[in-house]
Image (spheres, rainbow, N blue to C red):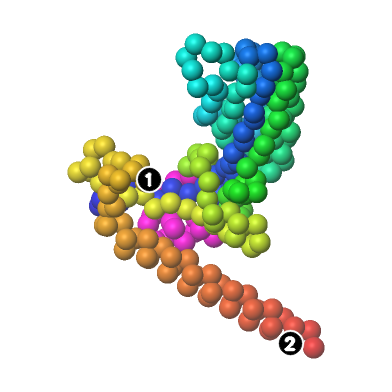
Amino acid sequence: MAVKTNPSLWNTWISLPLQFCEPISGLGTTDCSSYFNNNSTRAASNKVNVVTVAKFQGGGAFNVIPDSVTIGGTFRAFSKDTFMQLRQRIEEVIVGQATVHRCNATVEFASKDKPFFPATINDAGLHKFFQKVAGSVLGINNVKEMSPLTGAEDFSFYQEVIPGYFYFIGMKNEKNEKPASLHSPFFQLNEDVLPYGAAMQASLAATHLLESQSQGQSQSSEHKDEL
C-alpha cells in the first residue's frame, strides 16, 4: 500500500519556541560570537534546547562602524523548566557579555505579541491506549515511535487543560521520490492515506467510548453489591 507507517511518540515531541531581540549599543565593535556558545546556554545532559540567532542588524553604510546593533532569533526547549532556565540564561549572557565590552544591552522577549507555545506532551495513559487501537487498525509493525521535533503546535494548549495525544499518519508515496516539506508550496498530499486517517480517528473515538461505558457499568455493579 502507498501508506508507509503510522509513527507516534508518547512523550514530548514538539518544543515550545519564543522569539527574542536584543539591541546592543556602545563602543561600536564587540565580539558577538561569544554570546551564544555551547557552554553559555547549556542545559542538563538529559535536556535539549536550541538557540537560533537569525537576525543581525546594524548601521546603514559599508564604511561606518555602527554605534548599535540588534540581534534577534528564537529559542526552543522540550519542557517548561528548561525553557525558563534558557530564557534566564540568554538574558544573563547577553547583558554580561555587553558589560565586559563596555557596552549596553537590553533583551526583549516577544511574549506579548507572540506568546510562547507550550511543549506538546502526549499523555502516558493515552499512549498505551493509542498503541492498542493503532496496532489493531494498522498492524502493530506499522506503529512507530518518532524522535522529538523542534517545531511548535497549537494542540499543546489543549494538552495543558486535558490529557491529549498527537500522532502522525505516514503518507509515503513511492512515485514521489523527493517529497516537499509540509509548508512548501510544492507539497503534495497523498490522498491514499485519508481512509486510514478516518479509520484511526473513528476507532479511537469508538473504542474509548465503549471502554468508558464498560468501566461505568462495572463501577455501578460493584456499588450495588456493596449495598
Q: Residue 137 lies in what quarter of the image?
A: bottom left
Query: Is residue 43 among what the camera can see?
Result: no
Q: Secondary structure at mark 2?
A: helix
The crowding category of the residue bearing disc 1, from other C-alpha atoms within 10 Å (few below 14, some 14 to 19, many at least 20), is few
- Secondary structure, magenta segment, majority class: helix
Disc 2 target residue: 224
Residue at (28, 41) in percent of width and height: 179
Foreground of the two, 14 or 168: 14
Q: Residue at image x 60%, y 23%?
A: 69
Q: Is residue 53 visible?
A: yes
**Given the current orientation, which residue lies at the most extreme left position?**
175
- Label 2 is placed on what type of residue? Lys
Outermost right residue: 227
Q: Which residue is mark 1?
A: 183
Q: Which residues are magenta?
A: 125-145
For label 2, the crowd category at 10 Å Cα-Cα, with few meaning under 14, some 14 to 19 and many 20 or more, is: few
Q: Position of residue 156 (x, y in %)?
A: 58, 54
The residue located at (61%, 49%) in the rendering is 113
Tell me the element at label 1.
Answer: loop
Q: Who comes first in sequence, dot 2 or dot 1?
A: 1
Position of 214 with respect to 178 (left or right) is right
In contact (CB < 8 Å): disc 2 and disc 1: no
